[in-house]
Structures are given as C-alpha cells and as structure tokens.
Amino acid sequence: MFTQELRSQIDQVWNAFWSGGISNPISVIEQITFLLFIKRLDELQALAEAQANFTGKVIENPIYSEANMDLRWSRFKNLDPETMFRLFQKEAGVFEFMKNYGGKSISFSKFMKNASFMIPNPRLLAQVVDMLDKIDMNDSDTKGDAYEYMLSKIATAGTNGQFRTPRHIIKMMVEMMEPTPDDIICDPAAGSSGFLVAASEYLRENFKDELLKPAVSKHFQNEMFLGMEFDPTMIRIGAMNLILHGIENPQLNDVDSLSQANADFDQKASLILANPPFKGSLNSESVDEKILAMVDSKKTELLFLGLILKGLKIGGRSAVIVPDGVLFGSSKAHKKIRKEIVENQVLEAVISMPSGVFKPYAGVSTAVLVFTKTNAGGTDKVWFYDMKSDGYSLDDKRNVVSANNIPDIIARYKNRKHETNRARTEQSFLVDKKEIVDNGYDLSISRYKEVVYDQKEYAKPSEIISKINDLDKHRKELMTELEKMF
C-alpha cells in the first residue's frame, strides 16, 4: 500500500538528489532506478539462496558469485561512504556489474551502454542508499505506485505533446481489454512502460496458475511484451521498470515507431495499448510508407493510429488515447482514418474523458478509442461513454474525490449487450454505424448525446416588486419597534 509515509520517504530521497546537485528530474529518476535495480538483484539472490537452503539444491545461474559478493546491496550498504563510492566507480564495480548484468541474454543490457553513474560524491551516495534501504517496496502494487509517484515529478512532461498517462487510466484500459496469456502486448510509444507493466500485473492477478506452465512462463518473460521508444533515457527507465516488475527479458526497441526503421512492425501484436504523442508534427519523408498509405498526414496523433492498424494482427484489438480533435477534425486525413476504423475494422467504443485527466501537465480533452482489426469491417453499434470524473479533482492539484466513473465504465463496457435501451440523455449509450456515417464519421460524443434542459418558471416582475415592498414595509415596522425599546 502506497502510504503517506512512503510518499514522504520518496520526497526525502528526491530532495537529497536536489540538494546534492542533481536537479534534472529525469536524471534523478534514472539514478534512483539504477539503485532500486541493484537492490532488486540482491533481493533475487537472497531469494534463490533461501530456496537452495530449503531444497538442498545448488543455485542455478546465480546472480552473484563468490568473487563479487562485495557488490551486493546487503554488503556495501554498511560500508563507509568513501569505500562505497569507490566500489561504485571502479571498473569492475557495482555500477558496471549492473550495466552488464546477464550479458547479451538480457535485452535491456544494450540500452545500458551509455548509462552514466551521476551521483557526484560519497556523502550523497551513502545518504540515498540509506534512505532507499528503509523503503519497503516488496509488493508489486506498492512498487508500481511508488514508481508512478516518482514519474509524476518529471517537470518536463508535456513537451512535444508527450503526457505521462495516469496509472488509474492505464488500469482502466487494461481492465477493459482483458489481456490473456496468449497475447503479444505492445505499446508503440512506451515511455516508462506503464501500459506493459499494468498488463503484466493484470495477467499475474487473473492467470496465476496458467503462468506457472513452462511454455506460458517463457512467453511471458520473453515475447509477450513489446515496446518502442526513441528516447534513450526513457527506454532505460522503461526496461528497468519492467524488470523490477518481474519481466526479465522485455522486447524494447530503441526506434522511432513511425519511421522506416520500424517498417517490420507489421501484424506483430494481438493487443496494443497506447497514449501516443499529441500535437506533434513530422516530416513525412521519414515516415513508413505503409502508414502514409493509410493516413497521409504530418500529425503524430493520426500517424500513430495508422501505425497501430499496421502493427495489429487480424483479430487484434487496441485501446488508444487520442486528443478530441481526432474525433471531429475536418481535414481529409482526419476523415480518412476515422472512415478506415469504422468501415474496414470494428470500432467498439469511444470513451470521452474530461480535460483535467492530464493536469497539471495539460488541460487537453481526450478520448479512448477501442477497436478490433478485421480488414473486413464489422462495425455495427458503437458504444459511447461520457466520463465526468476519474476519481480525482480536475484541477492542477488532482486530489482524491469520491466521484469516480471508472468502475462504471468497466462494468458497462463488459456488458454492452445490456446498453441497447439506454437513452441518449444517459452517461452511456449505443449509436448505429449508419448514423455515424451520415455524420461524416464524426466520433465526438456531443454529436450524439441529447441534453435535457430543466425548464424554470419565474414570477412576474410585478409580483416580485410587490413582495419586495411587503418585505420593506415589514422591515420598517420592526425598526420602529426596536427604536421604542430604547
């Protein structure tokens, strides 16, 4: 459980970095992530040792050997600051061991090539190690919440249309899509890998026994999770985020998702969960030709929809966050991609979200599109939901509030067959494909929702004036009585 005490402990670590001269939020998160990963390696070794003692069997492929036991967190955390600092800095020290952990068998090791140990002095290292050692993040929910809290401190979020997706929105989308152990789950704008982590947590919670099977476990650890990210720092953070959550070999590619360099991402995924960059603009010469064939545009929010359609297998499904402009934009490219999804695929749902969801980074209005790739059409009725609250205030403070539509969204989405008789005045309703086509493939909920205005009747002006005069007369009478008393 992510308590106020844990939040305070993380704030203390953050402030220690700030006071120690590391003020770039992404650099702070990266350095904290490195240390948490080093701590995690020691925890995994300790677990293997406990199992070996219980079974009497030798540990297979131990993380640490007798030669480098001094690199373990449990060993160096008790050293004096100067000795600890030298142990991190030396050629075969703690940091180099972490960078090369697993050699070529671990996919994330290639992203660590340019990673740097940036903690500038022994005092700060000892201070941070001591603080992190006191933080209990053993269960995955607490670890995930703590990690998300750290990511929320990235002040640079929102540049180039990139917004950190709130964890509860990610969980909502995962719950709606119900990943299975057979899926290949992709996020083509992976960032810190929040969608992939949430999908893994869902699978662990709902398919615990299934994941124990060797073939399923192998798929889960190696091929199931696919992500793309062109920012080298974020891909390091994303890779270690996945590994900290028990996914040893995530398939993360350091590539611009929309470029020709990613052209082989074609019918690879069975489930895509994404929050692509908004309001970006690209040179079309660098974009994959197959994407441009579907949507000839420079707008990243449209190009990513083309990428998702290209990357999904037939029968694959997607939940993707888009800015409201995608739903009603009048350009040729806007209309073409909406027509493609409605006519040639199966558009299942449009969930309109309030503009405060992405605050304090931005006040942009967004929606979640849910569709399945068929390349043969099949859209019949589209389910619309008007989210009013996500459980947090819609101002910059984003405080917890009692109003929360998310449980209702999940419940209604999973029971859409019972939505048939809902009126257009309700929070959710179904719209026939024909009506959407007749409206130029407009997918904005305001186009279809009916608003009922309460009629109010007011008294005639003469009646109001008469009542005012009566009140004034009564007031004068009371004042006269008051004066007599004195």
Image (cartoon, rainbow, N blue to C red):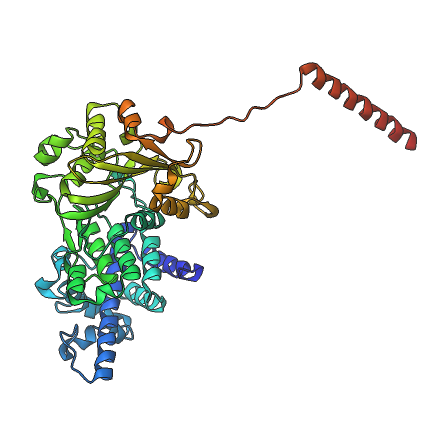
Quadrant occupied by the C terminus? top right
Left or right: where 472 falls relative to 6? right
**Where residue 392 appears, x then y in whole percent?**
43, 46
In the image, 399 versus 294, the foreground residue is 294
Residue 427 as seen in the image, left or right of residue 275: right
- Using the rendered image of the protein, determine whether residue 360 is visible from the camera's viewpoint: no
Instruction: Using the rendered view, name the quadrant where residue 140 is placed.
Output: bottom left
Residue 475 figure quarter: top right
* 31 vs 477: above or below: below
* Left or right of 131 on screen, residue 41: left
Residue 344: x and y in percent read: 18, 33
Question: Can I make out residue 145 in this image?
Answer: yes
Q: Residue at x 32, y 45 (%)?
A: 155
Q: Nearer the viewer, residue 132 or 355?
A: 355
Quarter of the image with the N terminus in it: bottom left
Q: Whole-percent x and y of residue 458? A: 63, 21
Is 411 rendered above or below residue 55? Answer: above
Residue in the foreground of this view, choosing between 203 and 170 = 203
Q: Give the number of callouts.
A: 0
Q: Is residue 453 above or below residue 301?
A: above
Residue 379, percent across and down? Answer: 24, 34
Does 56 appear above or below 409? Answer: below
Residue situated in front as seen by the camera: 371 or 173: 371
Q: Residue furthest bottom?
A: 56
Residue 29 left/right relative to 100: right
